[in-house]
Image (tube, helix red, strand yellow):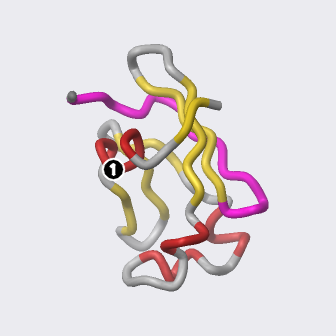
Amino acid sequence: MLLDVVHVQARHDFALILEFDNGEQRLFDMMPYIDQKPWVKLKSNNTFQAAFVENGTVAWPGNVDIDPETLYELSVPA
């Protein structure tokens, strides 16, 4: 299933509230991944809070992103 992220809100607990182009809202917990490359760069809450949507996925400054299919498959309904 090819879904694009259309909106993201980064929470202070390193979770993302995501809205996909099918209208579904989902919650993705980044904590299990925050110590892994390349996401270790996001350990600063200020950096994590800078999440934005780019080309249908979630990205951060410094060329860090995560695949929208991964976000969908590993998230839960919000």
Image quarter of residue 76 = top right
Is 25 located above or below residue 51 in the figure? Answer: above
- Hey, which residue is sitting farthest top in the picture? 23
Under circle 1, the secondary element is helix
In the image, residue 27 lies in the stretch drawn in magenta: no
Front residue of 64/73: it is 73
Is 10 located above or below residue 60 in the figure? Answer: above
For the C terminus, which image quadrant? top right
Question: Could you tell me which residue is drawn at 66 percent across and 51 percent down?
Answer: 10
Residue type at numbered disc 1: Thr
How many numbered callouts? 1
Front residue of 71/62: it is 71
Residue 58 image point, x, y percent: 44, 49
Residue 25 image point, x, y percent: 57, 26
- Hey, which residue is sitting farthest right in the picture? 12
Query: In the shown orientation, is residue 11 left or right of residue 57?
Result: right
State which region is magenta.
Answer: 2-14
Question: Could you tell me which residue is drawn at 21 percent across and 28 percent down?
Answer: 1
Front residue of 73/56: it is 73
Front residue of 41/3: it is 3
Image quarter of residue 49 = bottom right
**Residue topped by disc 1:** 70
Question: Could you tell me which residue is drawn at 54 percent across and 76 percent down?
Answer: 34
How packed mark 1 is, by other alpha carbons closer than 10 Å (few <14, some 14-19, many 20 or more), is few
